[in-house]
Image (cartoon, rainbow, N blue to C red):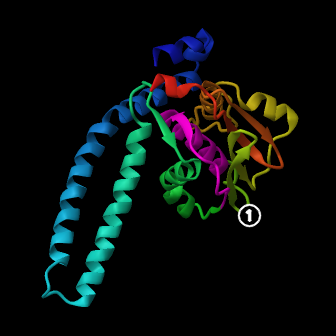
Amino acid sequence: MEKVAQTLEPYEINSESGQKRLLQMHRNSEVCSCVSGVTHDVNNLLGAAMAYAELVSFDEGISDDSKKMLSQVVDGITKCSRLISSLTSISRKERPDINLVAPQQLMDEVLVLRDYEFKVRQITVERNFEINTGTLAVDLPKLKMALVFLLVNAQDAVENTAQKRVKVTVGNAGDDVYFDIWDSGPGLNSEQTEAAFDAFQTSWSDGTHMGLGLFSARKIAEFHGGSLTYTQERGFRLLIKRDNGLMQMA
């Protein structure tokens, strides 16, 4: 928070909009500090529920319908645990957490975090994943957060469009891997594209958007030796260098 505040000019801090942004950042910071503890407790409770459900399913006296319902309970708990794990990984404190990941699986885990919002807003998500993308050494919390920022940006872009579509593509670019996030929104012209990656750049004036998502996503891409670019045809492309040297930090 202190570092962010230092990047704001004095007139921005003293302005109403600047103070709203700082207050929102403070709230978000406090919420994130609570997430790890809460998710740890929730995972313990889910584990207990899973154990009891599986134990009951072994009872030979229960009906087939009951077994089917117990199977649905176990499946639901598994999905909840996966969601909690994804949320926990991106809310960790600032420290390197280097992992070897499969790009497609990583993108699926991030999409799970936005699944509810996309359904509520009736946004159709198209997936186009290449099969042979191998593995990447990444700072997992950072890269997940960058992808979340891009999905939220796409969600906002289609807010007032008739056909709300988001297309997610994962593939190889030579020796590297890219994540493309395209949306059916109005798109950006050349002037807007140039400004889109600036800190505190937002077209929303309701105080709910910080204008830091694309700025942060580009910084994270650069941390991985990659880049974040935009074209109207493919949307935002987050490119990650396969030979990024991060395994040396593990």
In the image, residue 175 above or below residue 249: below
Looking at the picture, which amino acid does disc 1 mark? Ala
- Residue 210: x %, y % from top left: 58, 32
Quarter of the image where one finds residue 119: bottom right
Q: Between 196 and 78, which is closer to the camera in this rendering?
A: 78
Residue 63, compared with residue 2, is above or below; it is: below
Give the position of the C terminus as an image quadrant. top left
Residue at x-position 22% and y-position 56%: 47
Q: Toward the viewer: 240 or 162?
A: 240
Q: Which residues are magenta?
A: 127-156
Residue that appears at 58% across and 25% down: 245
Task: Give the residue at the far right of this rendering.
Answer: 190
Left or right for 188, reference 50: right
- Circle 1: element type: loop
Asked whether residue 143 is drawn in magenta, I would say yes
Looking at the picture, tell me which residue is in the foreground, 182 or 249. 249
Residue shown at 20%/77% (left/top)? 57
> Where residue 76 appears, x then y in whole percent?
34, 67
Is residue 172 in sight in this rendering?
A: yes
* In magenta stretch: residue 201: no
* 210 relative position to 168: left or right: left
Residue 98 lies, in percent from the top left, at 47, 31
Residue identified by numbered label 1: 162
Of the pair 86 and 170, the residue shown nearer to us: 170
Q: Residues within 10 Å of mark 1 (few under 14, many from 20)?
A: few
